[in-house]
Image (cartoon, rainbow, N blue to C red):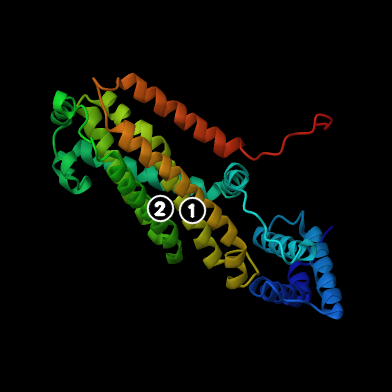
């Protein structure tokens, strides 16, 4: 079916706005009661919006409009079929294993952009470190990275460092979780700069990561590097990339390129997705913080490098499978290809 999208939006927008206003009133005042005429009008608006959504199902050039109408229809359906005295229960397992990965896949292009920027920064940082070693203090502004890789490895493997975090693992883990979550929220929030701030933060983190990797590889400590970074980095780095993904989703909604919706409508349409992404990142970073404090910081002879590398590699594979496959609806055995 071919429709004139501009004419269609002009004709139907007033009905969507009326339904949205009614929903806001019902969602704000949980005890609100509608008269019979108001219920009939609400039902009419719901049916009309659902019909509009069905007409747009195959119209791929307006994904933001489709998500906006999907949100309206879902909210209206919930109001029509709810019991006013009963609250909807949040199902954390269903959210994490279904809603979060589905949201990630729905915005895969933004994730690719985020990954490209981090990799671009890593390439720049690695090349800078390789051809200008004197830039180390600028590229890696952390005291524990100022040693040569060989010096650090020798220090980390001293017997007296067997349990250097004794009594401090929980506090160190809490610090890591708090700091990494703060950075992730900032990465997403900088999407309000039309994505410029998000891009800069991703690129700068990539610069430091690339510089560290090249420093240790050139210094002959690639095994130590993998054993140190993989256990927690296989979760922490993808988490930052997902936060960057959220930043670019926010930027796209603010810019509104190719959309006929108002900025307010575009932002409302993406709010559930941004919430899913940032809370999913928070859960991943809690795990990464625990792994870094209780596992990553312990090296040979306490924990063999091959154990840490294997653990990190399997963890990265599982995370990839989770993001790509979790929440995918099973194919009906009777379906034909």
- Give the residue at mark 1: 278
- Give the residue at mark 2: 184
Outermost front residue: 85
Answer whether labels 2 and 1 touch (C-beta < 8 Å): yes
Query: Secondary structure under badge 2?
Result: helix
Label 2 Cα neighbours within 10 Å, binned few <14 / some 14-19 / many ≥20: many
Quarter that holds the C terminus: top right
In terms of depth relative to the viewer, which is nearer, 242 or 39? Answer: 39
161 sits left or right of 38 in the view: left
Question: How many callouts does the rendering have?
Answer: 2
The correct choice, above or below, for 315 with respect to 107 in the image is above
Quarter that holds the N terminus: bottom right
313 sits left or right of 297 in the view: right
Point out residue 9 in the picture as x, y percentages from the top left corner.
74, 71
Point out residue 239 in the picture as x, y percentages from the top left corner.
44, 45
In terms of depth relative to the viewer, which is nearer, 56 or 231? Answer: 231
7 sits left or right of 90 in the view: right
- Label 2 to label 1, Cα distance in Å? 8 Å
Query: Secondary structure under badge 1?
Result: helix
Quarter assignment of residue 290? top left
Point out residue 159 in the picture as x, y percentages from the top left corner.
15, 23
């Amino acid at each position: 079916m071919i429709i004139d999208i501009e004419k269609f939006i002009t004709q139907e927008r007033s009905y969507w706005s009326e339904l949205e206003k009614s929903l806001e009133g019902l969602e704000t005042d949980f005890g609100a009661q509608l008269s019979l005429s108001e219920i009939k009008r609400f039902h009419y608006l719901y049916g009309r919006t659902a019909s509009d959504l069905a007409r747009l199902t195959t119209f791929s050039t307006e994904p933001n409009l489709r998500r906006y109408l999907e949100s309206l229809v879902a909210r209206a359906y919930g109001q029509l079929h709810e019991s006013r005295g009963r609250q909807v229960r949040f199902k954390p397992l269903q959210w994490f294993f279904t809603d979060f990965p589905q949201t990630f896949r729905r915005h895969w292009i933004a994730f690719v952009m985020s990954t490209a920027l981090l990799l671009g920064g890593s390439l720049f940082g690695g090349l800078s470190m390789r051809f200008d070693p004197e830039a180390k203090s600028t590229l890696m502004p952390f005291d524990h990275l100022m040693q040569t890789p060989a010096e650090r490895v020798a220090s980390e493997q001293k017997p007296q460092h067997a349990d250097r975090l004794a009594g401090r693992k929980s506090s160190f883990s809490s610090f890591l979780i708090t700091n990494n979550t703060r950075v992730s929220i900032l990465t997403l929030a900088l999407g309000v700069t039309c994505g410029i701030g998000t891009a800069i933060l991703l690129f700068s983190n990539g610069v430091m990561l690339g510089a560290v990797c090249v420093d240790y590889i050139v210094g002959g400590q690639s095994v130590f590097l993998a054993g140190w970074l993989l256990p927690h980095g296989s979760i922490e780095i993808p988490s930052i990339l997902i936060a960057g993904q959220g930043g670019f989703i926010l930027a796209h909604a603010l810019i509104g390129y190719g959309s006929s919706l108002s900025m307010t409508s575009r932002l409302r349409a993406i709010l559930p997705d941004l919430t899913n992404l940032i809370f999913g990142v928070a859960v991943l970073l809690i795990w990464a913080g625990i792994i870094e404090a209780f596992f990553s910081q312990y090296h040979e002879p306490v924990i063999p490098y091959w154990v840490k590398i294997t653990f990190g590699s399997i963890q990265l594979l599982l995370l990839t499978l989770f993001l790509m496959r979790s929440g995918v609806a099973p194919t009906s055995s009777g379906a034909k290809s």
